Amino acid sequence: MFNASNPNNYEYITKHLEIHILGGIKTTKLESLRITLSIQKLKQDNVLRHTIDLYNDNQVEKFVRKVAERLEIGTSIVRRCLQELTTALESYRFSVLEKEAEDNKPYLKELTGAEEKDAMKFLKRKDLLVKTNELIGKSGVIGEQTNRLLMYLIFTSRKTNNPLHCISLGSSGVGKTHLQSKVSELIPEEDKVEITVLSANAFYYFNRTELQHKLILIEDLDGAESVLYPLRELQSKKRITKTVVHKDTKGTTRTIHLTVEGPVSVAGCTTQESIYEDNSNRNFLLYIDESAEQDIRIMQYQRLISAGKINTEAEYKAKELLQNAQRILKPIKVVNPYAMALSLPQSVFKPRRTNSHYLQFIEAITFYKQFQRIQHVNEDTGEVYIETTIEDIQEANELIQEVLLRKSDLLNGACRSFFEMLKAYLKANTQTTFTNAEIRRTLRINPSNQKRYMLQLQLADLIQKAKGDKRKGYIYEVVNYDDYENTNKQIETLLKSTVEILEVQSSS
């Protein structure tokens, strides 16, 4: 009788012998069956303890003779008992491995007919993006109207051949990770990989296709600095390869290549925008809303949760519908017939990469609306594809305007927020000049941060010293109040005029 109910002490009892396998068995090395056992005659205290590899015939024969001599029992009985034990342990080990394989299988939800029908009906809505944003709000994402829809569409692009990526930026405690985790809940579990801490080489040891078309979520980029390089390569080249030295079972040393295939969509959060410049060039930068109005919305939602006044059933249904919509989206090529007529503002930094992101984002919207599009077939290749419409471009322009504005700004996000608050304070108090101490007290800002922002603003020629000296302190004045607004108007005008020209050309 074999009993493995105690993982550290298996029991095997026969008519003549009682055997205990101490510490269980290993499931990693199938070429051996090394165990530590105690063996004794039934109802006797004479116990023999020994470590043995049951697959080593020489060891087993020596052990049989030793047991027979020590316990005063026939060798044939001991030999047969050990053979039966070996068979039982083999069967048990294979059953454990099968269970582990079953448990580690990726979860794939099979949609019911009703669920698939509801998801299809939703994806065919003419106001799909508006309704998607409403459902994101109903699922428990408070405020962040543009950021949350942008993030959801970026996450959706993981299913395309050119996925998009994003980094959420903001001060500590404003809800960067919360926004990312809440929107990622709308993506099926089987399509995402959540990472808190990762070692430098961890990415190379995923199975070759394990990450293909997955969403990789990094809770804090500051804790994942060691993997930023392979992550960038996976984003740009859609595959990473590492060559390592490996010794095979015969002791021969050779080099092997570890390759992990993409494409993947990557999302992360950080407070330190400047540190991740190489990564930010490959990503949409989403600046978290740190306004007082957003604080009020979030605190009100927290109070409603505490009071038990949130309809959790409605939140769950909204989440489930968006997940099911993701599940029925199929890989399909997107062609943008209007691509040659699209352009970016001249003020955008690194226009080559930004232009690529702009076009990919339009494709992501078209991909999301695939069930509203006629499928075409390329006569030369036989490939099926769908086409972008002017409406897709218009919706992309409305969502991406803030992103393009940030990519056109001389200042980083934190410095821009400081400068906008500074200008608002001066206008409200009809002042033209200010001191560092005055602004520090009023805006309640950290002195080291203020010093850094003031230096950036002076280098950008947005403020200057009006009077004063180093000993008594300087008085500053703002040189340009309208830099941000002017850039915003230029971008808005260009995007709007592009759509108008396309509409005229399409109708003529």
Image (cartoon, rainbow, N blue to C red):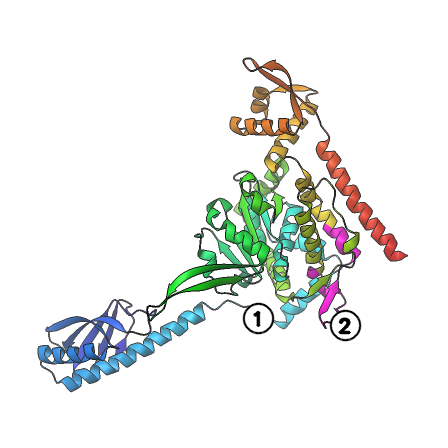
Q: Which residue is mark 2?
A: 379
> Is residue 270 or residue 58 the one in the foreground?
58
* Furthest-bottom residue in this view: 76
Q: Quadrant of the C terminus?
A: bottom right
> Which structural element holds mark 1?
loop
Q: Which of the two labelled residues, at mark 2 and mark 1, occupies the earlier sequence position?
A: 1
* Residue ID at (48%, 65%): 207
Residue 393 forms part of the magenta stretch: yes
Residue 263 horizontal side relative to residue 104, left or right:
right
Q: Which label sits in the foreground, 2 or 1?
A: 2
Query: In this orientation, does residue 304 appear?
Result: no
Question: Badge 1 local density, few (<14 within 10 Å), some, or many (20+)?
Answer: few
Residue 322 horizontal side relative to residue 195, left or right:
right
Question: Badge 2 local density, few (<14 within 10 Å), some, or many (20+)?
Answer: few
* Residue ID at (50%, 65%): 208
* Residue ID at (72%, 51%): 396
- Quadrant of the image occupied by residue 381: bottom right
> Residue 369, percent across and down?
71, 61
Q: Which residues are magenta?
A: 367-396
Instruction: Say what amino acid the circle numbered 1 marks.
Output: Glu
Q: Which residue is mark 1?
A: 110
Instruction: Say what amino acid the circle numbered 2 marks.
Output: Glu
Residue 135 forms part of the magenta stretch: no
Q: Are marks 2 and 1 in contact (CB under 8 Å)?
A: no
> Residue 395, percent across and down?
74, 52
Q: Quadrant of the N terminus?
A: bottom left
